[in-house]
Amino acid sequence: MKKILILIFALMATNTLRAWDFTVGGIFYNYLDTKHVEVTYGLFDYAGQIRIPSTVTYNSYTYEVVQIGNSAFQNGSGIVSITIPNSITTIGVKAFCACDKLLSITIPNSVTSIGWGAFLGCSSLTSISLPNRMMSIGDRAFEDCLSLASITIPNSVTYIGESAFEDCSSLTSITIPNGVTSIGESAFEDCSSLISVTIPNSVTSIGNCAFLSCTSLTSLTIPNSVTTIEERAFAGCSSLTSITIPNSIIRIEHDVFSYCTSLTSVTIPNSVISIGKEAFNGCSSLTSVIIGTGVTKIEDKAFSSCSSLASVTIPENVTSIGVNVFEDCSGLTSIIIPNSVTSIGQGMFAGCSSLTSIAIPNSVTSIGWEAFAKCSSLTSITIPNGVTSIGWRAFQSCSSLTSITIPNSVTRIEHGVFSYCTSLTSVTIPNSVTYIGGSMFYSCSSLTSVTFPNSVDIESDMFSGCSSLASIIISISNPSRNIWVGDRALRGCSRLKSIYLSVNSAKEFCQSSVKVIKGYGYENDIDHLPIKLMIAGEIITDLVIPCTLRTINENCFNNITGLTSITLSANNVEECCQSSVNQLLYSYNVNLPRTLMIAGEKVTKLVIPNTVKSIYKEAFKGCAMLNSVTIPNSVQSIGEDAFKNTGIYNNKSNWVEDVLYIDNCLIKSLNSSKKYAIIDGTRLIADAAFNSCTQLKSVKFPKSSLTTIGANAFNRCSFNSIKLPKSVTHIGNDAFSKYTKVK
């Protein structure tokens, strides 16, 4: 006998590497010990009607069948029925997984556990009876049993695993026995036909997504034993009209009831201390919420898109309110915020289109991004004295807002705060404000007047689209401060009649800024724009540039086709940039002729002030009507092609021996001779003046007048050597060829 036993164990050891140890009656088995075996998988998938015996005899030995092993019948797509004997105590992992034609099965009372995914994907299984001795239903045990309409869970069960009944879309009701202490994650997720659930007092926790998207579930009572409802437990239960939250709950986690679109009312008990992110997000039928006094924290988007919510009272203990908490609550007409709240978070009331008024408590110190954006019914608002900052687009598109009071405590107002407030008529910004972001009043089409503090600039798009704006008052208390006027700051302000700048000290006007400020040459003057002036740049007719102006940047006057007069009063311009000089005509304290167009097309006469030191490359190129230029002795350099294709350049009568002179400056030579004598009295040769004279071998310079030879002036000429007069003090880069010997 001992030898036989040794042989059997040897065979068992040999077969451990195989999927099965023996087969009887078309069923494969593995040894568990000398007396017990389990059903396992074999060479082929099982099919038809399977009857598992309680005992099996092999090689004259009889073994008790006590277990259905892992994956034993997995993918048995041809199996229609299975009979399990009372000897079986365990059904292993994925034992019947994907047996999609299996219609019914009886599990005997001997079974105490069903493993992970045991019946996963048995899509034809309509009913199943679980044994009274079973203690746990494993994770994913009946997941995707699409035809399972009913199941009775015995009282012996204490644990329902994760996704145990997930996607059982035909399951209509379920009674959870008193022995169960926890409902696992996604246990009943997507059970779309589930109408009712009975949760016993033994349950202490409901896992993540436990009843997620149970779209037919209409009502639910959570017993007092439950202390934890985890994230998304009832999210997407679109038929749920009411729910009772017990006093045992301390926290309402993230997304617990989100998109319960039929839920009409909720009472949050006093035991709850926090409401998680998006807890009631998308509950579009929710009309009332009672928040318990124990709540201290309401997290991001907790009630966002609750479009039927009409009123909310936030209890006094709340100290923290997250971002977008009431965003898109389009039916909200009133809300009470307690003094315990210190900030109005980002997007808190954004899209609350029915909110007509709101009282912000004195405890609030900041208003966040888009806090009241798109509150289209909000007519007025008072910001308390404690507020120091107003965030980006805080009141954007509040189209009914007619007035707002900004307190002296505010120091910073961010970008676009009042943009698209189309009913706002006037605003006074206190002197406490040190920064105002761009697009502040963008498209405020009813705004008629604005008073600015003495410490801010006019940023880009600040008043763009303010078609009713008539005046802007900026009181400058510091004479040394620069005023910045950004791009498109006053675009479309077609009714703007005046800008007042007291003690104007602007030192630099950048592109699209010169268009908007008119000064009279004295720092203490009040600047006033003529009524004819349109500030968008399209119809500027008169412009007086203040005496403090020192730089005119490139393209400052581009596209101002209606400008007929520019006056520079005792101006201190030191440098005119490329394509600016060709638009700036100077006549000391005298207005330009009214025939002048400043875009460069019709410039006829130019007197350059004696403060100008440089004329840049191509500065006047293309001014075809420019026939008269006065160049003062202050000019020390003239760039290449500075006057090319001007009226002077194109008129051959202005050329002497194919050389163009303006005043005492040699501008350009097209002379093809080998020798050339520069006219006596010439003091400056422009950049690249002789660059095209490749045959030129010698030049006679004036004896005493010439001081400057520009860059590349003779670079391509055929000089071997050249002797310069002693009067020359400046020679530009590459003025002569590298092969030329300069003496």
Image: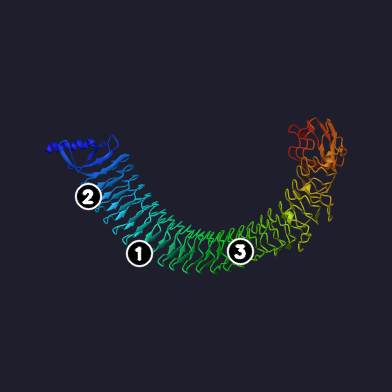
Badge 2 crowding class, 10 Å Cα cut-off, few under 14, some 14 to 19, many 20 or more, is some
The residue lying toward the viewer, choosing from 458 and 105, is 105
Query: Where's the N terminus, which quadrant?
Result: top left
Looking at the rendered structure, the secondary structure element under dot 2 is: loop
Q: Which x, y percent locates residue 319?
A: 48, 66
Q: Which residue is mark 2?
A: 110
Amino acid carrying label 3: it is Thr
**Which amino acid type is marked by label 2?**
Ser
Q: Nearer the viewer, mark 1 or mark 2?
A: 2
Q: Marks 2 and 3, how far apart in space?
A: 76 Å
Vertical placement of 25 versus 567: above or below? above
Nearest to the eye among marks 3 and 1: give it: 1
Location of mark 1 (residue): 224
> Which comes sooner in the sequence, label 2 or label 3?
2
- Residue 288 horizontal/vertical position (percent): 48, 65
Seen at 54% across and 69% down, the residue is: 361
Q: Quadrant of residue 444?
A: bottom right
Query: Horizontally, is 58 left or right of 18 in the view?
Result: left
201 or 507: nearer the eye? 201
